[in-house]
Structure formats: C-alpha cells, structure tokens
Amino acid sequence: MEVILLEHVEKLGKMGDKVTVKNGYARNYLLPQNKVLRATEANVAYFEKQKAELEARNQTLFDEASKKAEALKGFKTVLIRQAAETGQLYGSVTIRDIAVAVKEAGFDVERRLVYLEKPIKDLGVYQVKINLHPEVSQTILVNVARTVDEAKKQEKAFSQE
C-alpha cells in the first residue's frame, strides 16, 4: 500500500515522503495512529494544503521533545530488586518499570517511548534509550541493585569504566 507520511517515522522516511508499506502495517498501525494518509489523488491534494500546518505542529512537538531531552540529560534512576547470589534477578526489569521510575522522578514519559532491546535480567547499570520524538532521543542510566548501598558501589564502578 502506498502512503504519505504525516510525520517522521523511523526506518520509513520523513514527513511528506511517499512510501510503500505492507497492507497490515498500514491498516493496523500507521493509519490508526494518524501517521500516514493513503496516497490517493485527493489525499495528496489535502496533504499539500495542510503541509504548513503539519510542519508547524511537528516543529512544536520537536521543540517540546528537545526541552524534555535536555532536562533528562544525565538522569539516573535506581531500581531495587531481589536477586540470586549470582546476580540474576528473580523477575526482570521491563519498559513499564523504567517508565514508572522516570515518571516518579517528575518527567512525563510514556511507556511506549522507552526502548529496551530485551528485558533486564541481571544486576548492573544499564543505558536505556528514550525516544521522545522520532528525531529526538535521550539515554538515561538505570541502576538495578539489591540494596541502595550496592547501587552506589555499582554506579561508582560504572563511572570508572
């Protein structure tokens, strides 16, 4: 299905690009999220009329995300979890846990903005990427430890690397 991007979509293109995507991806994700329009003649004309307004909205969102990214710069959080003597967690730290910790610190970050390649299953300090806007992201440190004292030791060891 050929679509017109209404905003920058990672790995697809920038706003205004015409791209071809699989039907299911367009129907189930891109169209319901209002990220694209079907590339019909009427929609192309509509997009050209609305282009300035869409660019202004995108710039506003970009500016807000840049401010949030600046505020999150150097952000660290400690998550206390139970773990075995080998350092393996009894559960795992997921995107939800990280989003809650960031929110409790006073930042308005939704769960879908946190990017983890896989759940954290061991003690340690991890760098986690937060995608605030398709063009703006920030990396935060998540320290997973059994106790606060252990978290301080881990952070000290991590900063010396």
Image (tube, helix red, strand yellow):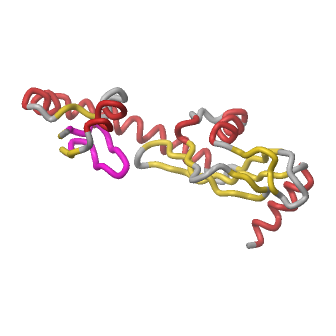
Q: Work out which residue is located at the far left of the displayed protein and give it.
A: 41
User: In the displayed structure, would residue 129 be above or below residue 1?
Assistant: below
Quadrant occupied by the N terminus: top left
Total number of numbered labels?
0
Image position, residue 20 (x, y; %): 21, 45
Please determine whether, in this image, residue 117 is positioned above or below residue 32: below
Where is residue 34 drawn, in percent x and y?
A: 32, 29
The vertical placement of 113 against 85, above or below, is: above
| Residue drawn at point x = 9 percent, y = 30 percent | 45
Q: Which residues are magenta?
A: 3-17
Q: Nearer the viewer, residue 46 or 114?
A: 114
Say whether residue 6 is left or right of residue 62: left
x and y, in percent, of residue 53 in the image: 25, 30
Q: Residue at x 73, y 46 (%)?
A: 92
Question: Where, quadrant-wise, is the C terminus in this rendering?
Answer: bottom right
Where 133 sits versus 149, above or below?
above
Q: Foreground residue, 156 or 142?
A: 142
